[in-house]
Image: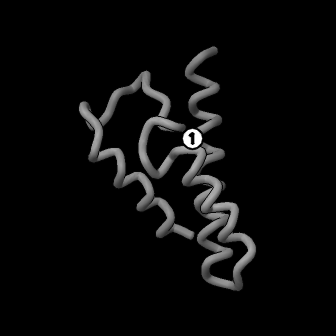
Amino acid sequence: MLATMLVDADHLLSTPIFAPDRCSINFHPLHTYWAMGVYVLLLFFRRIPRMMGVGLLFHMLTDWIDCQLRHL
């Protein structure tokens, strides 16, 4: 599950790498809705892919919550 944090490596592709007011959902390649669809498909496999899918979707959920809190 901790290895799913490597999905944040796609932040290195953006300029600037870190922008405090930027929402990563649908901005970075591995944070797009298409990528999330793939993460949902991982839930239908056995054991390791399923755990990866859960971890990646949880990561997307926490990023989405972060985006929502920035707009308060």
Please identify the residue farthest to the right as the structure is shown: 44
What residue did someone put label 1 on?
63
- x and y, in percent, of residue 17 in the image: 27, 37
Q: Is residue 54 above or below residue 34?
A: below
Expressed as whole percent of the image width and height from the top left, the position of residue 63 reads 57, 41
Q: Say above or below: 43 vs 63.
A: below
Q: Residue 41: image x %, image y %? A: 68, 67
Residue beneath the point at 61% across and 77% down: 49
Kindly identify the residue that appears in the image at 62 percent across and 25 percent down: 69
| Drawn side of residue 4 relative to residue 36, left or right | left
Asked whether, in this view, residue 21 is left or right of residue 40, the answer is left
Q: Quadrant of the C terminus?
A: top right
Outermost residue, top side: 72
Q: Is residue 21 left or right of residue 56?
A: left
Going 50% across and 64% down the picture, which residue do you hit? 4
> In terms of depth relative to the viewer, which is nearer, 5 or 36?
36
User: What amino acid is found at the position of numbered circle 1 in the picture?
Assistant: Asp
Q: Quadrant of the N terminus?
A: bottom right
How is the protein colored in the picture?
A: one colour
Identify the residue shown where x is 59% and y is 17%: 71
Residue found at the very far front of the displayed protein = 34
In the image, 8 versus 28, the foreground residue is 28
Give residue 58's position: percent from left, percent from top: 65, 54
- Circle 1 — which element? helix
Where is 12 relative to 70, above or below?
Answer: below
